[in-house]
């Protein structure tokens, strides 16, 4: 092959770095001694993910593509990838003690998270339908394994099997939609598709619309939006708690990034065709997330329904981006969505850190009733968990309130009043089950106390996330500036 035709690998260097690092970590785990290999591989994996964060910024200068236009990197990709890398690294740190106490401390766990993260980063930078599918499947295959990582537990095995079967179905729907679009448009390239639909002046084939619907179904499964949410409560409850924490954050944010990239990139001109579907998914997710969580007694199941609701709120921003008219208003929709995802990541990491500390006599407990009287036995943990619950409920002036405020404002700007009103009402209903946890901790009499020991790593995670949630209102500039630049990158034309 002539040298001139070789692709520039610079835009994909962070992904190449992660791929090589994952293979080296695998060999390090295999060839090191049994006693310390898991701990060594875990710390090395965290280091690799942290090093990748500045790396993605260093190699990105504007918008650049490689591999024949199938891979794109821009400010939008940098923003989403940074959230994913922070989430994955934090989950590995959080999982250390849990894996040891449960007797499943194996070096494959952090390596699988690194490989899943690599798949997420490939998804976010996909600029072609085939590249999208490759990244999605690399992520999914790693997540299927870690969902059932606790092999001796029937619940964990069941969670992994459910996630695998329903994930395969969603991948099939996505692949069928992609094949429809390729069949009727004649290309898989996002840039070429965008040009075709821009020049078609709304003369869109029915086959393309059907393909978009199937793709939306597949992507909605990945973010666990209604009506493709059925796997979420069972998998969240059955999977090991650190895995649930990972599922709640990194894959959701990556899939949302992919959702935005696909809808705004190749199908940006077809907002009239897909906006109504997004509005329906958003409304259904907000309402189900609000009402279905009310009767939950297991805190991980409650967090599953909570995450479904939060994805509904975030999708309001995508519905705004599908509105016809001013590109600046559409960019505001994406920006509000990105701000929401950043806040969602911090609150969920903090909440799951608290859930991982719910132990009695060294054994994990998951019932909401197990938090009874926590304010008396462990006032610091009760206070920090209360902050996270108030933030999720959208109580001002915490960060969660501002996240919802931004998406509701964006909806009102493009006259999606009904969507904003439903969002506010769902938020009020959802506040009930968040505040119920606070009531249990502060106003119910304690029966059995939870264990008090907290490791330095968990203390650090709780303090950092808590400070961000409380003080975000005073210094929101880094997140707002990053989200604004990332949204602007998608509307560069």
Image: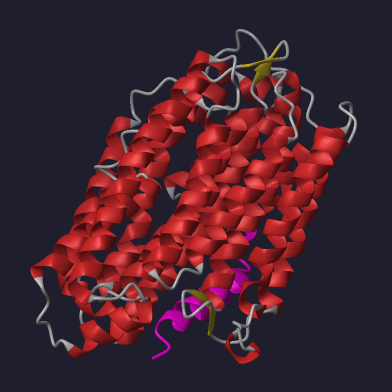
Q: Where is residue 244, by image quadrant?
A: top right
Assign the C terminus to one quadrant of the image.
Answer: bottom left
Q: Is residue 373 above or below residue 314?
A: above
Q: Residue at x 69, y 47 (%)?
A: 90
Specify start and end residues of the magenta stretch as a single range: 470-493
Q: Where is residue 304, by image quadrant?
A: top left
Q: Is residue 153 above or below residue 134?
A: above
Question: Is residue 396 at all visible to an observer of this figure?
Answer: no
Q: Residue 327: horizontal and vertical position, in percent?
A: 32, 85
Q: Nearer the viewer, residue 349 or 110?
A: 110
Q: Nearer the viewer, residue 382 or 493?
A: 493
Q: Look at the image and say whether residue 471 sits in the magenta stretch.
A: yes
Magenta residues, dominant SS class:
helix
Q: Is residue 59 above or below residue 374?
A: below
Question: Is residue 143 at all visible to an observer of this figure?
Answer: yes
Q: Residue 62: horizontal and vertical position, in percent?
A: 57, 87
Q: Residue 251: horizontal and vertical position, in percent?
A: 50, 50
Q: Is residue 406 left or right of residue 216?
A: right
Q: Look at the image and say whether residue 492 sits in the magenta stretch.
A: yes
């Amino acid at each position: 092959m002539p040298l001139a035709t070789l692709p520039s690998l610079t835009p994909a260097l962070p992904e190449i770095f992660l791929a090589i690092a994952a293979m080296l970590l695998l060999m390090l785990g295999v060839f090191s001694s049994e006693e310390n290999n898991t701990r060594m591989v875990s710390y090395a994996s965290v280091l690799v993910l942290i090093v990748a964060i500045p790396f993605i910024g260093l190699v990105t200068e504007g918008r650049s593509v490689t591999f024949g236009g199938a891979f794109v990197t821009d400010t939008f990709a940098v923003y989403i990838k940074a959230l994913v890398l922070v989430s994955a690294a934090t989950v590995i740190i959080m999982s250390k003690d849990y894996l040891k106490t449960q007797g499943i401390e194996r070096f494959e766990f952090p390596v699988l998270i690194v490989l899943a993260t690599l798949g997420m980063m490939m998804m976010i930078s996909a600029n072609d339908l085939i590249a999208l599918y490759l990244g999605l499947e690399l992520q999914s295959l790693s997540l299927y394994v870690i969902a059932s990582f606790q092999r001796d537990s029937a619940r964990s095995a069941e969670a992994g099997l459910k996630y695998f079967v329903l994930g395969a179905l969603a991948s099939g729907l996505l692949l069928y939609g992609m094949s429809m679009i390729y069949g009727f448009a004649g290309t898989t390239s996002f840039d070429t598709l965008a040009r075709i639909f821009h020049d078609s002046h709304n003369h869109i084939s029915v086959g393309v619309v059907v393909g978009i619907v199937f793709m939306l179904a597949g992507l909605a499964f990945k973010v666990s939006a209604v009506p493709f949410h059925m796997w979420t409560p069972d998998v969240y409850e059955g999977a090991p708690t650190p895995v649930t924490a990972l599922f709640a954050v990194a894959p959701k944010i990556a899939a949302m990034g992919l959702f935005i990239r696909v809808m705004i990139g190749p199908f940006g001109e077809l907002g009239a065709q897909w906006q109504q579907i997004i509005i329906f998914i958003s409304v259904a997710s907000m309402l189900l997330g609000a009402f279905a969580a009310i009767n939950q007694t297991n805190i991980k199941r409650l967090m599953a329904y909570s995450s479904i609701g939060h994805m509904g709120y975030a999708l309001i921003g995508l519905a705004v981006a599908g509105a016809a008219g001013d590109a600046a208003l559409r960019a505001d929709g994406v920006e509000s969505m990105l701000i929401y995802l950043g806040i969602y990541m911090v609150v969920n990491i903090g909440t799951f850190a608290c859930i991982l500390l719910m132990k009695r006599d060294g054994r994990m407990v998951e019932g909401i009733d197990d938090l009874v009287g926590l304010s008396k036995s462990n006032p610091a943990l009760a206070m920090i968990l209360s902050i996270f619950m108030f933030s999720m409920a959208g109580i001002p002036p915490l960060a969660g309130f501002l996240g919802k405020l931004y998406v509701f404002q964006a909806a009102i700007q493009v006259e999606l009043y009904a969507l904003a009103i439903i969002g506010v009402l769902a938020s009020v209903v959802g506040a009930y089950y968040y505040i119920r946890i606070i009531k249990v901790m502060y106003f119910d009499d304690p029966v059995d106390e939870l264990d008090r020991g907290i490791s330095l790593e968990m203390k650090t995670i709780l303090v950092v996330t808590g400070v961000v949630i409380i003080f975000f209102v005073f210094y929101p500039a880094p997140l707002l500036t990053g989200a604004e630049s990332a949204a602007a990158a998608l509307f560069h034309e």
